[in-house]
Amino acid sequence: MRGLLATLLIVLAGMAAAVEPDEILDDPLLEARAREISRDIRCVVCQNEPIDSSNAGVARDLRLLIRERLLAGDSDDAVRQYLVDRYGDYVLFKPPFKPATYALWLAPFGLLALGGVAAGMALRRRGGRGGAEALSAEDEARVAELVARYDGDANRKDI
Amino acid sequence: MQRILVLLPILVVLILGGFFVWGLNPDRDPNAIPSALISKPVPAFDLAPIDGVDVPGLASGDLAGGEPVLVNVFASWCVPCRAEHKVLTRLATQEGFPLFGINYKDKPEDAKAWLEELGNPYLRIGSDESGRAGLDWGISGVPESFLVDATGTVVWRYVGPIATEQAQDDLRQALAAARERAGT
């Protein structure tokens, strides 16, 4: 049972990444960085899959390219920039914060603020209507009479 | 204030409607990948000729030759390239532009046989066996074509075979624009 589970886990782990044995770097630190970067790079063939788990030929080439740049001493950001220079921001799953993407990043906050203002206005208007005027003496008397009558009815039922 | 609130639903409908008009437009290809290369100089690369094919190789320096050229990325193993080949051959003669090729991830003997079978319309072909130059051009597959203007700037890109009327018209338009700019 335990062996079966272990086998299953190993097979599943293999499915999660498409990295082939011959791509893996000898240095585990560099390899870890390469995996980290490639998880955030979009495969340009299968579009919604990161190159880390894509079996497309171009994805493999890009994985090898990332490792080559890392071996050449590039920082993680330099490697990402290298890819962006060739494929555009499109290859990044997380778009950078810059003038062209302000709307993308800031729109949710703008909408929240808009909703907040609308809600605030609605609440204020309702509050203003609620605290109208006090009851007149006549109305007070009528309310007292109704309450008394109701209490009387309730007592009668109890008996 | 009340009057502005009355207009609000109309505004919402207009915004949503505009979004639908854009989103449901049959001419829009949601899978189209924006190219990072447009309006940029061609990437630096230097490719040797294919063994046994008697046209020279291709390097970045060959692409700023004073007139617009079409760079076509092709491979013998690519079926749509076969469909595109005839169209490109005809267009290159008809429109009179130099056609350069990048032979992507291909074995030299296969490429040679393919060109012998279908004819060779390319003035220069760079052999990109490793696919590295393809990455520098930012391609996602073959075939792919780039129009490079007289100064060596990429001005137009087409992903997939240039076979449909629409694609050919697009190319003619981009070519005319590039020529006009080169002329002035």
Image (spheres, grey):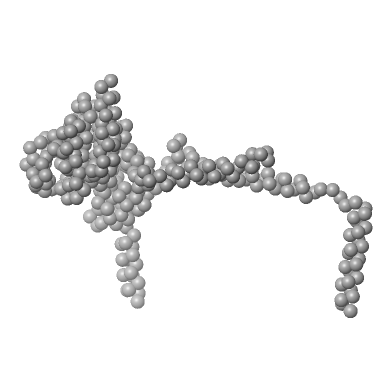
Quadrant hosting residue B87: top left
On the picture, is B145 further left or further right than A134? Answer: left
Name the residue furthest top.
B184
Image location (x, y in percent) of residue A116: 62, 45
On the picture, is B103 further left or further right than A109? Answer: left
Quadrant hosting residue A91: top left
Is residue A84 among what the camera can see? no
Q: Is residue B92 above or below residue B109?
A: above
Q: Residue at x 19, y 36 (%)?
A: B91
Of residue A45 and residue A84, the one placed in the foreground of this image is A45
Q: Residue at x 90, y 55 (%)?
A: A139
In what quadrant of the picture does the N terminus of chain A appear? bottom left
Name the residue furthest bottom.
A159
Q: Number of numbered discs present?
A: 0
Image location (x, y in percent) of residue A155: 89, 74
Of residue B115 and residue A6, the one placed in the foreground of this image is B115
On the picture, is B164 further left or further right than B19? Answer: left
Q: Residue at x 51, y 45 (%)?
A: B16
Of residue B53 and residue A83, the one placed in the foreground of this image is B53
Quadrant hosting residue B116: top left
Is residue B110 among what the camera can see? yes
Image location (x, y in percent) of residue B143: 23, 44
Q: Residue at x 17, y 43 (%)?
A: B85
Q: Is residue B32 above or below residue B63?
A: below
Image location (x, y in percent) of residue A5: 35, 72
In what quadrant of the picture does the C terminus of chain A appear? bottom right
Name the residue furthest front.
B165
